[in-house]
Every structure is written in structure tokens, then in C-alpha cells.
């Protein structure tokens, strides 16, 4: 049974997971990183503590920490039920069991909430694609995890193209993951995205990730704006 959700749910990931899918360790410390559609990830908290300058953006941040926690608890049962119905769609060699996955997500949520309450709007900005409230080239790298291609069936071509263009406006490089849809099949929009960024003069590469949980989610897309001549 394909995994299916009618709306985005607060389901965050930690720095270890971001490193596996985005090669965070290869980004110099001190780099300005934007995490788009970040949700309740603990990545910003952990990465800032390790020397990167991370800003997280998500419409979720209009809510209080208590309200976000309530949304997580409400979604938790639904998400885990769907995962348990589709165990073969995921890799369990590192995580072990659905119970351990759930415990990891709870731990991530707690770390996020602690940092969210401490840093609020300074680090967590209420914002959503395809329009971001940041200046041109405000960031060195922008990341988007488990959002654009995964939900392309509901978000559509125009939204996805506009979102990629907007991320390239605010960052010199973007990294998108995964390149598959919610059903695990390859994105139908990826060829159009590649053609679009090429027309804009950007370079794009598809890179293998170190590890990922979803079967078929084996690569990320990296797009770089051309260097500005001195």
C-alpha cells in the first residue's frame, strides 16, 4: 500500500540524517544554510551548535511550541500506522524497527521544541514556498528535505518550478532530496526542473546519498548558480 497523507505533517529529522542525505559535513563551518520546509527538525539546533549558521523556514512556526507538539502527537499515530502497513517500502538495516523510528522522531521533536522556545523568530522563520522573505543570495546553501518531489502529485508543476527558482534566488546552491514521489516512483517533474535550471544558466548534478530510509530514495539534486566573475 503506497504511503499517502492529505496534508503536511510535523515529522522532523536530525543532523545525522541530514548529513546522510545532504552531505552536511562537506559544507564549511560558518556557512549560511537555509532549511526550507524544515518542520520540527532538530537539524537547525544541532548544526548551529556545531558551527554552521542555520535558519529554518516553515509555515509551522506561526504556532506556539505547545501547538506544534499537539500537532505532532496527533499526526504520530497516523504516520506510524501507514509506515507499519508499508514496511517493505523502507530500509530497516540501521533504524531497526518501527518502534525505534518512532522513538527517534520523538527525541528529534523534543530537541526541536527546546531550541524553538529558546530562539524563536531569530532562527525559525515563518515562511513557505514558493515565496521566501529573504534577500537575494542571503544564504550559501539552501536545503529542502522530503517536500518538493515527494509531494509533486498534489503541489503540481508550476509550484515546484517556482519553488526551485525561488530557492536559487536566496541561495547560491540548493540541495533537494528525495527525487522520488510519495509512492517511491521517480519524479515526473525532475527532467523539467533540470531543463529549467539549465536555461537559467545554473549547473545541476544528481548525487548518490550515503543512506536513506525510503526505498528508491537514493539520490539528491544539487543545483549551483554560476560564479560571479571578479
Image (cartoon, rainbow, N blue to C red):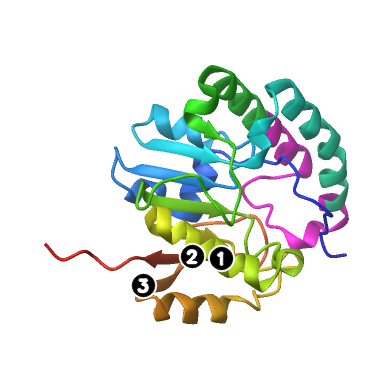
130 or 90: nearer the viewer: 130
**Predominant SS along the magenta part:** helix
Q: Closer to us: mark 3 or mark 2?
A: 2
Give x and y (percent) for residue 123.
48, 30
Taking the image as shown, residue 104 lies to the left or right of residue 153, namely left
Query: Which quadrant would the C terminus be assigned to in this image?
Result: bottom left
Taking the image as shown, residue 25 lies to the left or right of residue 59, namely left
Q: Label 1 near label 3: C-beta < 8 Å? A: no
Say whether residue 16 is visible: yes
Q: Label 2 near label 1: C-beta < 8 Å? A: yes
Disc 1 marks which residue?
162
The answer to which of marks 3 and 2 sits earlier in the sequence is 2
Taking the image as shown, residue 53 lies to the left or right of residue 146, namely left
Which labelled disc corresponds to residue 165? 2
Q: Would you identify the image quadrant in which residue 188 lies?
A: bottom right
Disc 3 marks which residue?
202
Give x and y (percent) for residue 171.
39, 54
Which labelled disc corresponds to residue 119? none
Amino acid at each position: 500500500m503506497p504511503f499517502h497523507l492529505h496534508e503536511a505533517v510535523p515529522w522532523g529529522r536530525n543532523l545525522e540524517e541530514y548529513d546522510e542525505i545532504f552531505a552536511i559535513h562537506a559544507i564549511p563551518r560558518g556557512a549560511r544554510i537555509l532549511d526550507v520546509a524544515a518542520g520540527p527538525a532538530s537539524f537547525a539546533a544541532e548544526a548551529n551548535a556545531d558551527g554552521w549558521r542555520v535558519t529554518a523556514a516553515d509555515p509551522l512556526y506561526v504556532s506556539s511550541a505547545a501547538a506544534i507538539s499537539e500537532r505532532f502527537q496527533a499526526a504520530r499515530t497516523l504516520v506510524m500506522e501507514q509506515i507499519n502497513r508499508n514496511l517493505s517500502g523502507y530500509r530497516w538495516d540501521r533504524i531497526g524497527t518501527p518502534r525505534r523510528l518512532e522513538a527517534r522522531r520523538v527525541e528529534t521533536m523534543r530537541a526541536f521544541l527546546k531550541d524553538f522556545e529558546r530562539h524563536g523568530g531569530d532562527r525559525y522563520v515563518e515562511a513557505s514556498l514558493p515565496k521566501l522573505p529573504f534577500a537575494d543570495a542571503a544564504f550559501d546553501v539552501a536545503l529542502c528535505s522530503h517536500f518538493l518531489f515527494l509531494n509533486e502529485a498534489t503541489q503540481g508543476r508550476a509550484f515546484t518550478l517556482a519553488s526551485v527558482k525561488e530557492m536559487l534566488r536566496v541561495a547560491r546552491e540548493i540541495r533537494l532530496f528525495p527525487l522520488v514521489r510519495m509512492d517511491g516512483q521517480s519524479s515526473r517533474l525532475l527532467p523539467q526542473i533540470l531543463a529549467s535550471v539549465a536555461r537559467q544558466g545554473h549547473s545541476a548534478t544528481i548525487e548518490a546519498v550515503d543512506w536513506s530510509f525510503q526505498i528508491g530514495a537514493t539520490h539528491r539534486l544539487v543545483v549551483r548558480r554560476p560564479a560571479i566573475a571578479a
